């Protein structure tokens, strides 16, 4: 893949924008594909979100391939990236980039690490998970207490990678780094298949997951990050 990076194609962007990347990670992480259709009682936006929240609560983890496109409107810059992400509740998460190869975002249970050697091999950013407010967790960010956290509108249905999905627009009721978001939740599996996030800087992030593997066996070593020798650790 070509073009500039953005959370999944580590962006060749200034530090101010890179500092917000962990919030997208999260958006990143929790889009799962189940196999048996699950019922939704009613078709309101809140009913769909509550059913999806229950579905995610039953999961023990997942891995998926991801494709991401980020448009930085102020810079008129579009970046694309891809790789694999895995999540092990409640606080382990990794985005391992294959394009650009070597970039990683890792939540190790204590800290959130953002390392983009394709952009700056001399620095890695570290943030305490408590300060990250769970934004690396898709379920926590978009599906926990959906009636309190978001005003939701059901916009219709679309097909994402062969899966029919509800399309919901979400507007935060509380302080958030997102101005609004759109989420695609499978009609049959009640799992997120796609996200569109508009942040306070008017940047737009699109994230799609495919080849989803539910409840895989994951070693905690996978979620370990050791800064390479000579790399400066910048703690937020």
Image (cartoon, rainbow, N blue to C red):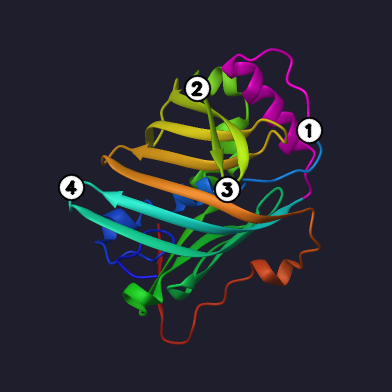
Examine the image and state in which quarter residue 232 appears.
Answer: bottom left
Specify the label residue 150 is tagged with: 2
Question: Would you name the residue on which mark 3 appears?
Answer: 161
* Label 1, label 2: how far apart the Cα atoms are: 25 Å
Where is residue 112? Give x, y as percent.
53, 58
Pick the residue in front: 34 or 219: 34
Question: Along the polypeptide, which appears first: circle 4 or circle 2?
Answer: 4
Question: Along the polypeptide, which appears first: circle 4 or circle 1?
Answer: 1
* Label 4, label 1: how far apart the Cα atoms are: 42 Å
Per the rendered image, the range of residues in magenta is: 37-60
* Label 4, label 2: how far apart the Cα atoms are: 26 Å
Badge 2 marks a residue whose secondary structure is strand
In the displayed structure, would residue 62 be above or below residue 191? below
Question: Would you name the residue on which mark 1 appears?
Answer: 37
Badge 4 marks a residue whose secondary structure is loop
In the displayed structure, would residue 147 be above or below residue 191? above
Please tell me which residue is depicted at 50% across the width and 52% down the height of the picture.
25
Pick the residue in front: 6 or 124: 6
Where is residue 135? Give x, y as percent.
52, 44
Question: Along the polypeptide, which appears first: circle 1 or circle 2?
Answer: 1
Please tell me which residue is depicted at 73% across the width and 66% down the height of the picture.
220
Question: Would you name the residue on which mark 4 appears?
Answer: 74
């Amino acid at each position: 893949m070509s073009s500039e990076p953005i959370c999944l194609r580590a962006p060749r962007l200034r530090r101010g924008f890179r500092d917000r990347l962990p919030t997208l990670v999260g958006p990143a992480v929790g889009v799962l594909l189940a196999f048996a259709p699950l019922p939704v009682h009613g078709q309101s936006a809140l009913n769909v979100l509550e059913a999806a929240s229950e579905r995610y609560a039953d999961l023990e983890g997942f891995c998926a391939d991801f494709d991401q496109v980020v448009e930085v409107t102020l810079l008129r810059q579009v970046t694309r990236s891809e790789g694999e992400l895995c999540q092990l509740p409640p606080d382990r998460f990794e985005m391992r980039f294959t394009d650009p190869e070597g970039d990683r975002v890792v939540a190790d249970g204590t800290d959130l690490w953002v390392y983009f050697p394709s952009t700056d091999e001399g620095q890695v950013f570290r943030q305490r998970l408590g300060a990250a407010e769970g934004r690396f967790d898709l379920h926590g960010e978009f599906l926990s207490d959906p009636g309190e956290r978001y005003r939701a509108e059901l916009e219709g249905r679309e097909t994402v990678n062969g899966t029919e999905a509800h399309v919901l627009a979400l507007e935060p009721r509380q302080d958030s780094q997102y101005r609004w978001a759109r989420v695609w939740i499978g009609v049959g599996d009640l799992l997120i298949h796609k996200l569109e996030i508009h942040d306070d800087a008017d940047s737009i992030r699109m994230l799609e997951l495919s080849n989803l593997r539910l409840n895989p066996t994951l070693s905690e070593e996978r979620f370990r990050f050791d800064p390479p020798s000579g790399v400066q650790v910048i703690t937020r």
